[in-house]
Amino acid sequence: MWGGDGASKRRGEGFEGLPGAAHGGAPAGGGWASGWRRDAGDEADRLPDELLRELEQTGYYPQLLADVVLQALAGEPVLDALVHLETTFDADAVRRHVTVLALTATRLVTAHVDDHDPPETGGAPVAVASSESVPLSDVRSVVIGHRVNAPERYRAGAAPQELTLTVAWGTLSRLDVEPATCGDPECEADHGYTGTMTADDVSLRISADAEGEAAVLAARRFARSLTRGTRTSRTA
């Protein structure tokens, strides 16, 4: 079990074949989250064992995911990370999308891998991967939403039923537009449109019902680590 909130249990010791995989326990040293035993000053040529295990547990091209994240890190050690698998159902296909958020002493690294239709009918599966590296000083906001059933019975430290983590740094924004009105229900004049723009670079929704309580606690742990990291970057 690792992370400040006892976020997730280690499952399965075998992850042979993953790039940078190592045998044995977690690396020794210090870190922000107790599960990430790395010294922020060391050069990292592999991913932490726990992150490799979580990539393996997604069952979705773990070697590709590991390579994409490792390349984006460019040798900087990981202090904390969050792996989120989302599965959606189309009329004739099941699609998967994996997001990895990796926190270093100076950056937030995001990586995405998802399914795409093959160029030809009946062709081999296609996965598209991308990554982005954001200096912690550029992170504008970390928004954490909690949904709690029966809040009168809530106890300190318990996992909410659902947690939403939204991180914004200004690359992407969502614009919601609707017809403007003057407030008069009888008015038929055209008042144009009104809208709101919301920063929405990364938004993850983790549900205890769908993914388990451990996944919610892991997201809460990472959100705390990221919030601490952005605070530290502004006071340094």
Image: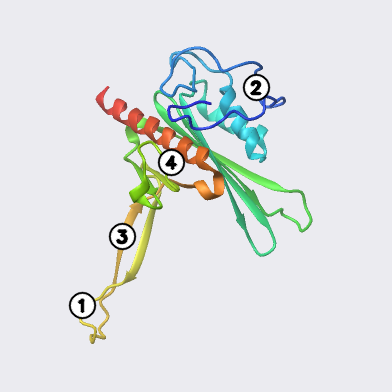
Which amino acid type is shown beneath numbered disc 1? Answer: Gly
> Which of 37 and 103 lies nearest the eye of the viewer?
37
Which amino acid type is shown beneath numbered disc 2? Answer: Ala
Residue behind mark 2: 21
Residue 90 drawn above or below residue 233: below
The image position of residue 152, as x and y in percent, is: 33, 50
Secondary structure at numbered mark 3: strand
Which amino acid type is shown beneath numbered disc 4? Answer: Ala
Mark 1 / mark 2, whichever is N-terminal = 2
Residue behind mark 1: 183
Mark 2 / mark 3, whichever is N-terminal = 2
Residue behind mark 4: 159
Q: Are marks 4 and 1 in contact (CB under 8 Å)?
A: no
Give the CA distance from mark 4 to mark 2: 31 Å
Give the CA distance from mark 2 to mark 3: 45 Å
- The colour scheme is rainbow
Which residue is pictured at 63% across the width and 58% down the height?
89
Secondary structure at numbered mark 2: loop
Which residue is pictured at 42% across the width and 45% down the height?
160
> Is residue 117 toward the left or the right of residue 159 in the image?
right
Residue behind mark 3: 196
Q: Which quarter of the image is occupied by the C terminus? A: top left
Q: Are marks 1 and 2 in contact (CB under 8 Å)?
A: no
Label 2 vs label 3, nearer the camera:
2
Label 4 vs label 3, nearer the camera:
4
Secondary structure at numbered mark 1: loop
